[in-house]
Amino acid sequence: MDIPELIHAELTKCGVTLAASLPDDWVSPLIRRLAADPKIKHVPVGREAETIAICTGAFLAGVKSVAVMGTTGLHSCIGEMMTINLRHGIPVLVICSLRGTPEDHQVYQEQQGRRTIPMLQAYDMPYVALEKPEDIQRIPEIYTHSRLQKRPYLLFLTRRLLRAGK
Amino acid sequence: MMKRDECLQILARHAPDDIVVSVFSAAFDWVKIRPHALNFTHVGAMGLAASYGLGLALGRPNRKVLVLDGDGSLLMSLNTLVTIGSVAPRNFYHFVCKNGTYEVNGGHPIPGAGIVDFAAHARAAGYRNTYVFDDLAQFENEIGAVLEQEGPIFVTLKLVPGAEAEHDYAKLYAEENRLAFKRALAE
């Protein structure tokens, strides 16, 4: 199994039946994989903040969901996560590429990438970075933890992890 | 133009037990007119009322979801129209309370006030049907049939403020209301 297949399998174990997404090139294969699953309702959006609100509505309706986006998108919807999910104690699991690391050679990812983790720490949003294929099996416990935290919860896909699947 | 409270009173008679997501001025009026566990008012930053509604509509496909959006709020996320037009939930009814201002933020005019046609945007984005109401009698006569149609439906309500409702955000965002909403949805 490749990395998107492994992640998809673990999300299925979690009971995820809705995925809202806006791609960057690193998370794109995972989005394709989720969109191809007839048991998952995939909602492509025009702006990352939509994924946060859609998953919030789904949570309230008792549906397990996941938002998928790139790092730049994460920075663009921090206000929504603060005023919706932090303010009202509503969990949302966000799967996000971790751009701007030394393995990322795209210059346009550098500025936001350097500030991603400090930003999450400032907002007190928990996160886990998946570095190796064997980390993927942690997704169910991370999903449960995200529900217990009642906050936005970031699950980062690192370049190292995504390269391991090549 | 219709007075908002009078218009929402009519809507409440046609939506006694539906899920309703409402924002800002419309929310204050709505919860006074239709107090109900299935009112969701815990919105955050402006612009995403329709996205909450979409998540709820997908999660509860057998229940109608009404969104009472603001024109300033919708203007902030016109992209949500395209997402909803694309997903096309049959149980989704999107109302925009159009008063041309950022009412709770000081009454400043929104860009395009008097020009922008949100129903046209929604139609172009793929909503099944769109309507514009500015007359209370016509709204009373037609809203029942509008709500009988399959969604997504978009309705522009041309409004002016009516009787003032209390603007108490602590009540509007009270945790017990959110918990009651989730419990009611689980029934």
Image: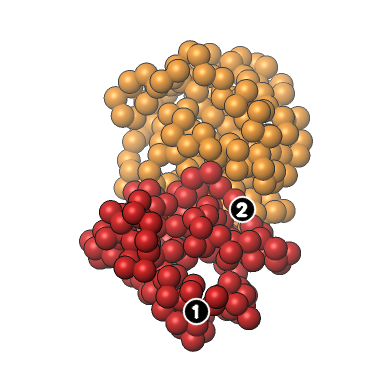
**Mark on residue A164?**
1
Q: Is residue B69 visible?
A: no
The three-letter code of the residue at mark 2 reads: Val
Nearest to the observer: residue B72 or residue B85: B85
Dot 2 falls on a residue whose secondary structure is: strand
Chain A, chosen colour in render: red
Q: Residues within 10 Å of mark 2 (few under 14, many from 20)?
A: many
Image side of residue B160 versus residue A30, left or right: left
**Residue bearing the label numbered 2:** A43
What chain is colored orange?
Answer: B
Q: Is residue A71 visible?
A: yes
Nearest to the observer: residue B95 or residue A21: A21
Q: Residue at x 45, y 82 (%)?
A: A132
Q: CA distance from mark 2 to mark 1?
A: 28 Å
Dividing the picture into quadrants, the one containing residue A82 is bottom left
Question: Residue B135 location in percent, x, y?
Answer: 61, 14
